[in-house]
Image: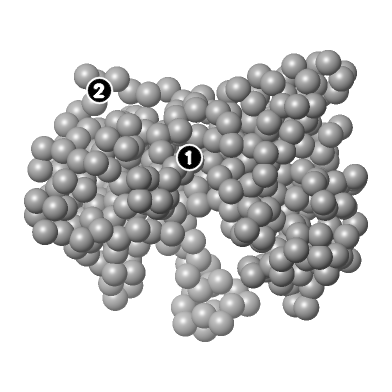
Amino acid sequence: MGVGPLRFGMSPEQVNAAMGEDAPHGVLSGSQRKWSRYHQHGVSAIFGSREQLVAVGVNAIYGPLVRWEGVVLVGRAPSEVRADIGRLALRHGVEAVPNVEGERDVPARGVSVGAVQQWLLDAEGFLQRGDGMVTDLLVTGPGLAEDPHGERNVASWRSNSRRRTPEPGPWPVRPERERPRWECVPLVGVGPLRFGMTPEQVSAALGGETPSSRHTYHPYPAGSLWEDQGDPAEERLIEERFEAAGVRAHYPWWEQDRGPFLGAVTALGRSGPQVLLDGIPLIGRPLTAVEADILGYLKDNDLGLRLQCSGDLEIHGLGVTVRTARVGDSVISEARLGAEQWYEE
């Protein structure tokens, strides 16, 4: 039982031999291998506690076209794969259940479908982000099918393969006519918000809205190397989400134990205000259209571009990053605007 030339229970050496490639990238826990990535094949081998193959991850862009009874499960529109899996599961009398990404798992077959942003080759052979979502795949061996992501090494591989928190839906999009229009003043602020504001000032600027969620951290956790540098019980705010305004406020720094202070704002693609950068609308549009406008803006203003690890495009020196938000089988644009200190850190 396995995928292609791989069989569950193989050792790392046997997997290397079957792939005809020594994995150039992998993650170890002590001396034990947790998972290995085979770039030439677009496949990841995930190992259990005894270094036996327990799962195989298949890349959406580079991976082989894995099939179940002739149905391709990789590199397709997620809604199409969900429908096909539902039909196959019904035919075989097995259950297809929703997973954390809004796609489908079939525990009886060890199949777990995920969704990632589409990447395409441009005219010069370079990868660039597309406007769609496509499926990738995790196939598990016996013992993991019921809860594949509960296994520690599978979870490690998945978190490494995902640059964003999954967006399982639903994906309602605020109509353009209902979005307030905010001007972006690079490195200074956006709309009514100014970098350096306190959380109380941010809430007041947003009409007194109370954040729907808050994220905090402990800078001096007990048992850490930093425990003696402060109070282990101290808790610091790093992010607030405002649903009505459609923004996330980020608080990255403190000064002389004072803070937190607003360092960046994310205008959400599905629900946020329309942010204008010198007249260019950045929010809720097809990603490729926004990136084309940005490239023209860079050329006209002699500015540089920085590609982040996530694939997001940052206008270097302006603190403006074009991001994406999922809407079913597609993605739309959102933006993060930050102070100079945010991008330096």
Q: Which part of the image, by quadrant, shows the C terminus?
A: bottom left
**Mark 2, residues whose alpha carbon is within 10 Å: few (<14), some, or many (≥20)?**
some
Is residue 107 something that shows in the picture? Answer: yes
State the residue position of label 2: 176
Residue 104 in the image, given as x and y percentages of width and height = 69, 30
Is residue 184 something that shows in the picture? Answer: no
Between circles 1 and 2, the one closer to the viewer is 1
User: What residue is rendered at 21% in x and 48% in y?
Assistant: 295
Label 2 is placed on what type of residue?
Glu
Q: Which callout, 1 or 2, points at the residue further toward the start of the chain?
A: 1
**Is the image coloured rainbow, by chain, by secondary structure, or in one colour?**
one colour
265 displayed left or right of 62: left
User: Which corner quadrant of the image does residue 53 belong to?
Assistant: bottom right
290 displayed left or right of 92: left
Give the total of numbered labels.
Answer: 2
User: Gap in Å between the C-alphas at discs 1 and 2?
Assistant: 24 Å
Residue that extends furthest to the front in the rendered view of this protein: 124
Residue 116 in the image, given as x and y percentages of width and height = 53, 41
Circle on res. 118: 1
Q: Which part of the image, by quadrant, shows the N terminus?
A: top right
The one nearer the camera, 23 or 121, is 121
Q: Is residue 307 above or below residue 266?
A: below
Q: Is residue 54 above or below residue 270?
A: below
Label 1 is placed on what type of residue?
Gln
Q: Is residue 99 above or below residue 172?
A: below
